[in-house]
Image (cartoon, rainbow, N blue to C red):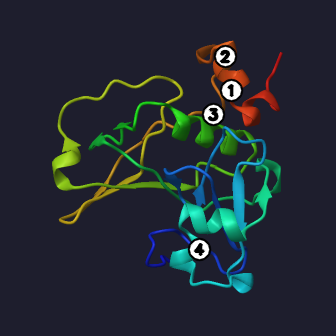
Amino acid sequence: MTCPCGLFCDRARGTRSARRRARTGDWDVDVRAASPFYHLDPAALTVPPAEAAASRTAAAIAPTVEVDALRPLDLIIIGSVAVNRDGARIGKGAGYSDIEFALLTEAGLVTSETVVVTTVHSLQVTEIPIPTTSHDVGVDLIVTPEETIACANPHRPSGVDWSALTAERIAAIPALMARQVS
């Protein structure tokens, strides 16, 4: 079910949110923290779900958990600055959504069955090819105010592309440091 805040809430498992502004499905993730996710249990909320989903409120009321404490995702809503009808997308440019997706994939929480959706204005849908790399996350569906676009065969990374990360980037992100393969 979709709640008014736009997050995918699963009443049986609880909604999980975390500490970064960009939302990834029912997670709002800060991979820069050792325990990057907030666990928002709808049954235990002391405020309405839409209010609890706000990052400041979640930080005040929810315990933090690590990737290993999470459950599989059915749906991810990912932010995009621009997207094309093939499902290739441009995010904000820092690559955090791609890292989050890769960590969740490696943990078995994102599978080929997980639906990846972006919501954009129709002006953000381009016919121009968007260059992608092996770590870029493509979308299955693009939702605009005018239409819903199904994308055939969007790219899905199989995990963290360690070769694309510098030592400094890994050191700055505890969730990566904890999983670094030597």
According to the image, label 4 marks what residue? 52
Q: Residue at x 70, y 23 (%)?
A: 170
- First in sequence, mark 3 or 1: give its number: 3
Please state which of residues 123 and 55 is positioned toward the viewer in this rendering: 55
Q: Residue at x 60, y 35 (%)?
A: 99
For label 2, the SS is: helix
Disc 3 to disc 1: CB gap under 8 Å:
no
Q: Quadrant of residue 129?
A: top left
- Does 116 sit left or right of 48 as displayed? left
According to the image, label 3 marks what residue? 158
Q: Please, what is the three-letter code of the amino acid marked with disc 1?
A: Ala
Q: Give me the C-alpha separation between circle 4 and circle 2.
A: 33 Å
Disc 4 to disc 1: CB gap under 8 Å:
no
For label 3, the SS is: loop
- First in sequence, mark 4 or 3: give its number: 4
- The image's mark for residue 33 is none
Disc 1 to disc 2: CB gap under 8 Å:
yes
For label 1, the SS is: helix
For label 4, the SS is: helix
- The image's mark for residue 168 is 2
- First in sequence, mark 4 or 1: give its number: 4
